[in-house]
Image: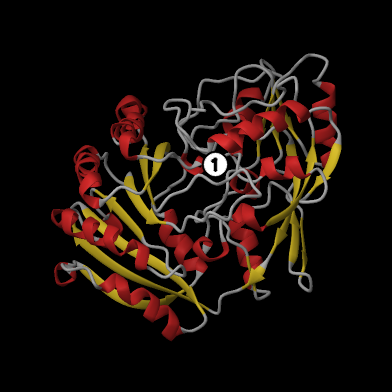
Amino acid sequence: MRGSDGYEEARRAAVWNGLVPNRFPDLIVQAESVEDVVAAVRDTKPDGYRIGVRSGGHSWTASYLRDVGLLLDVSRIDHCAVDTERMVAVVGPGKVGSVLAAELDKQGLFFPAGHCEGLCVGGYLLQGGYGWNSRVVGPACESVIGIDVVTADGEQLYCDSENNADLYWAARGSGPGFFAVVTGFHLQLHPRPPVCGSCLYIYPIELADEVFTWARSISPQIDDSVELQIITSRNLPALGLDHPSMVVASPAFAESEEAAAEALAILGTCPVVDQAIIKVPYATTDLAGWYGAIMSNYPSGHRYAADNMWTSASAEELLPGIHQIVETMPAPPSHFLMFNWSPSAAREDLFYGLEDEINLALYSVWEDPADDERCSDWPRSNMAAMAHLSSGVGLADENLGRRPAKFATEENMARFDRVRAEYDPDGRFHSWMGRVS
């Protein structure tokens, strides 16, 4: 309870971000089992407690941490059972995705876990799940074939396409707006791709116009096995670079080294490739190596703010905003990420569905509380300035409390509200911190 010994420690421990919001639930329950979840939901109902649910705490905005009500921490519910014959896993919301990926890898299996270490699957799967090889296998929520939930009344339900189908539909992609507690995810697994290859090109920022124009023009031609990622930062101390740079580093999942190298070859066609500071057209790698590289951008103990946008705008339209992003960028490891995507009109059986050709994401990272105001607004202000080019935002890097934006189709939002009215008529579960209907 708020005011009791250990409360503030538990409140702060619930947030991975070093920038802990000044929001204070009345009660924090650290559930050890499904029975604990049922008890917490039922016992707080007479008092009208609203509920926020936390799995791994990696939400940039800590959207689960709200004033008053109940914070239900399910990170300790981390069971995992893998059926290799059926290629199905049942995991708890507190299971760490990078650990799951490593365990599956040893068994010749694969699941599109998130790109960062430490992400628990609960929040990741609910918000959609842009993960490894997702351009091929789809967002991770598409591989969720069933869920175990506790409803607003404390009732335990199993949901899939044939049982409680509306609740199953709503769970896949609604993120922090979901109105039940998921205590288990039933996952369709995939064969592990035999090869993970990569390339690495680093360009000085003076070539931004050429690099981004080229990258935007080739995006539709890139094989789905390749994730085009361009990371821009003020310098790269880990590589001995003290100059603003653009890093083109892309994994490719393939059946052979030859196929991976062939798929990545297009990333060597930049017209200014001869001016690259570093040029590695192909190298064999693995998920462990990629996790290590990515986590250098997200050190623990730091303060974070993020924002993003989906877009199909041309490079000519995007470049003024990109220049402003670069000119105002805080010190590293703050960075700007652009990645390509493969939108699909076939995602009709799940809430997730707002996506576009390109995603732009900004991550402000700093340590000194004195820099909070300046650094925390860099992602929001730049994305707001480019909002006229945006088709919406992805919930993985949402900043809805400070910049409400569209994150789902109007049709899906209308259906979602109808389903919520059926399963959570009293609004016990907190919804998104902002929305544009």
Residue at 61% x, 27% y is 431
- At label 1, the amino acid type is His
Q: Is residue 396 left or right of residue 377?
A: right
Q: Measured along the vertical axis of the image, is residue 226 above or below residue 195?
A: above
Q: Quadrant of residue 107?
A: bottom right
Which one is in front, 313 or 39? 313
Q: Position of residue 138 (x, y in %)?
A: 56, 59
Q: Position of residue 396 (x, y in %)?
A: 51, 43
Mark 1 is surrounded, within 10 Å at the Cα level, by few (under 14), some (14 to 19) or many (20 or more) other residues, namely many
Residue at 24% x, 56% y is 212
Which one is in front, 353 or 117? 353
Residue at 30% x, 58% y is 238
The residue identified by callout 1 is: 58
- Whether residue 182 appears in this view of the structure is no
Residue at 30% x, 70% y is 267
Q: Measured along the vertical axis of the image, is residue 64 above or below residue 227?
A: above
- Whether residue 369 appears in this view of the structure is yes
Q: Measured along the vertical axis of the image, is residue 401 above or below residue 300?
A: above
Q: Is residue 409 left or right of residue 123?
A: left
Q: Quadrant of residue 264?
A: bottom left
Q: Position of residue 208 (x, y in %)?
A: 18, 54
